Image (spheres, rainbow, N blue to C red):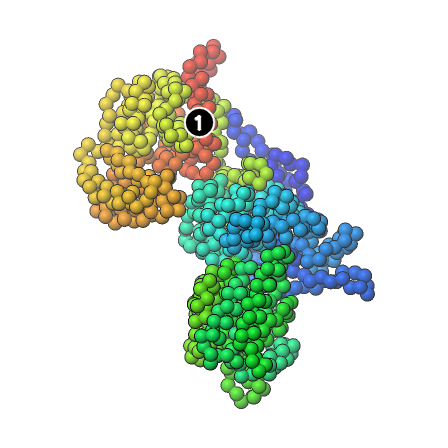
Amino acid sequence: MLSRSSFNLLNLDDYSCVTDRPRIPRIMTVPGIISDFDEPDNGGRNLSSGRRIIVANQLPVKAKFDTNIKKWVFESDADSLVLQLKSGLTPGPESEPGSETECVYVGSLPVDIHPSDQEEVAQILLEKFRCVPTFLNLEIQNKYYHGFCKHYLWPIFHYMLPVTRTHGVRFDKTAWRAYVSANKVFADKVMEVINPDEDYVWIHDYHLMVVPTFLRKRFHRIRVGFFLHSPFPSSEIYRTLPVRDEILRALLNCDLIGFHTFDYARHFLSCCSRMLGLDYKSKRGYIGLEYYGRTVSIKILPVGIDMGQIESVKSSPETLSKVRELRAMYDGRVVVLGVDDMDMFKGISFKFLAFGKLLENYPELRGLVVLIQILNPARSRGQDVLELENEMQNVAREINRKFSKNGYEPIVFITGPVSTHDKVAYYSIAECVVVNAVRDGMNLVPYKYTVSRQSNHELDKVLLNDEPEGHPKAKKSVIIVSEFIGCSPSLSGAIRVNPWNIESVTEAMNLAITMPEREKEMRHEKHYKYISSHDVAYWAKSFDQDLERACREHFHKRCWGVGFGLFFRVVALGPDFRKLSVEHIVSSYNKTKSRLILLDYDGTVMPRGMVDKTPSKEVISLLNNLSKDPKNVVFIVSGRGKDALGPWFDSCKKLGLSAEHGFFTRWSGDSDWESCGESMDIGWKKVALPVMEHYTEATDGSFIEQKESALVWHHQEADPDFGTWQAKELLDHLESVLANEPVVVKRGQQIVEVTPQGVSKGVVVDRLVTTLQSSGPLDFVLCIGDDQSDEDMFEKISSSLGNGIAEVFACTVGQKPSMAKYYLDDTVDVIKMLHGLEEASTRVPKITDFHVETRT
């Protein structure tokens, strides 16, 4: 298959946009500013019409070597989730009727293929199954999957820390390198087949969490979704990972990240907040993280099951035959069923202990109730699996020894692999299913059990011993489910238990066995209604639609990559958003004669991380030289109080100051402070201050800043999550108690602020410009700020200052969405730019300058 990923390999300047037409080179439009002429858009294409490239650790195929023909033979794996999800991927409206969305699968095979056979196998898999195999060598495979994935990452994601060598595997750099190398192989295979302009990539699970970085590095506008099928641990657990930043930033290179439950998503968002300082926003039901100009969307929806597959299996002769066999075997007994993988988190021993306690506490159930435990093969190997198996066997052996009699065995083991037909047969005869995992990502056993218990004509006849006139008895079920697994929130009629509390599980089992029939039916109906309407097709369609929505703005932004290795990320900004060039602004500066320069203080000329906020000698010198130029009016516009700003800038006699967001203004060092509200009532402080003091006492690390015109509650030193939570509560509280006062309550960067109405930096700009224009034309305005309060200045400039002013520069600090047209990276860039203006103001004019001026 020809890959369009190779079309643009020689375009080293920007290879993020591979299009059908030749790339028009970037051109210089003004001195120092590089722009993209005729930036490509989606060309009117239907964004949902592309293929879906499904990337998972394992391909949805079964493989076996046929010794007769000496070749590998493959067949589709109907139980594979990545194969089942195709039923929910519908083609776009412009597609032909009856057409299907094309899916290409990238993953590894469950068997080791000899290098001499790999090319032939790859061709067969691509042509017959649309699969692209990743052939990892045995050493990389073992270190990547069995080493890092299963014995390090998987336990941590299930809340198990490797505190000692007997409780988990310690972090191993070679295993981590193998993980990265394997992820690179998967990404390379995606690059071989992708059309980056049209295709969507959907990556599955924790095995491939750094694949998004490799893809985003190669194609900046690639459409990437990721779904995590395991739990995402709390930030306290996740932050123990030595490679926590690399993995977190790799996930943020996706457009959409999916989780089964809100808990998992909440933990991920908490990690982003604590480690990267990112706050999420919820808008019209969608959760998003702003990350370098890109919005990373968060999806919360548990996966479903393939209803069609279960219904088909229920009616098959193979299943019906197995049901007859099981009915005869367990006639007259109540079957409690467990279906679990062989791993340490499934709580199988706890389940056995609870069942033993049931028989001990309720002697009448001995000989009546049987626990059938189906054990799926372990997905990995190691000492932990052997220890688990020994413990489980010992517990079961002791219970069976104690309560067995006359052919009755309380606990029956069925060791896997067990076919889907046989599992459905066991589900059909079980009065109750117990899912007792201590931690699990989703677990679809309760879903499959519920659908298997739903009425079915052929199955009902078998369950009723082939009596045609009998009444169906299968439309009822009881589920005992651990509260620590992903499916628990969606099963509102289940009996939820704490698996560590053996007594509570015991009582749940007794309740399930003795529950009235009508109660069982009602619980079953509730579950079946949800499961049947939220199947795997619903889940896939919902995720696919959200991925399309998350990618709609890709071709409306300019993108470029920054960072090295796994810390790579893409900066995406609006088509008119440019970095402010020193050469460009100096050129405009030299041509103008009446200039207004507005500078925020914290985060603009003073880095936010500094403890000592006093301006440096360099800043004082810069501001002095700029304000001494008779063509300039220079103002510091800050939220700080006048008692701080005044003494700091007393040596700058020509510098203007605007304090407390414009409530106080001083035109020069020799003039008095003017207030915009001389008769303004500040009696509201008596109401607001006690409320803020209450939240300060309750929030460690917070403090109150009292200004003459405002009150500010700071929480930057508090716990990030708790501080944000308290800030939201404080905002609601203050808005309630100050509803009838002439004030505005607003959130800022780690603050909650109460200010008088009509006071903002935008009002300051309006007042200054009006005053200056009354004395003559104003032909140059430069406004630089870094936070939300400065957006008022940018908005005022862009909305009302364009007319009559030749040169207007609204500039934000940092690459982020803003009302400003320009940006600078940090305070270092701001100082560098001011130095450029200083040199232009203080240099000796050349003779050519006078000639230019005369001609003008």
Left or right: residue 208 versus residue 816 is: right
Q: Position of residue 756 (x, y in %)?
A: 25, 38
Q: Position of residue 124 (x, y in %)?
A: 74, 58
* Amino acid type of the residue tagged 1 in the rendering: Val
Nearer to me, 207 or 666: 207
- The vertical placement of 411 against 184, above or below, is below
Nearer to me, 103 or 247: 247
Quadrant of the snapshot with the C terminus: top left
SS for tag 1?
helix
- Answer whether residue 576 is visible to the viewer in this image: yes
Nearer to me, 594 or 445: 445
Task: Kindly indicate the quadrant of the structure image that contains residue 418.
Answer: bottom right
For disc 1, the neighbor class at 10 Å (few under 14, some 14 to 19, many from 20) is many
**Residue at the image point whose x is 49% and y is 27% from the top:** 581
**Residue at the image point whose x is 62% and y is 56% from the top:** 383
Q: Position of residue 258 (x, y in %)?
A: 51, 54
**Residue at the image point whose x is 50% and y is 79% from the top:** 366
Left or right: residue 437 versus residue 140 is: left
Q: Which residue is mark 1?
A: 830
Task: Kindly indicate the quadrant of the structure image that contains residue 13.
Answer: top right
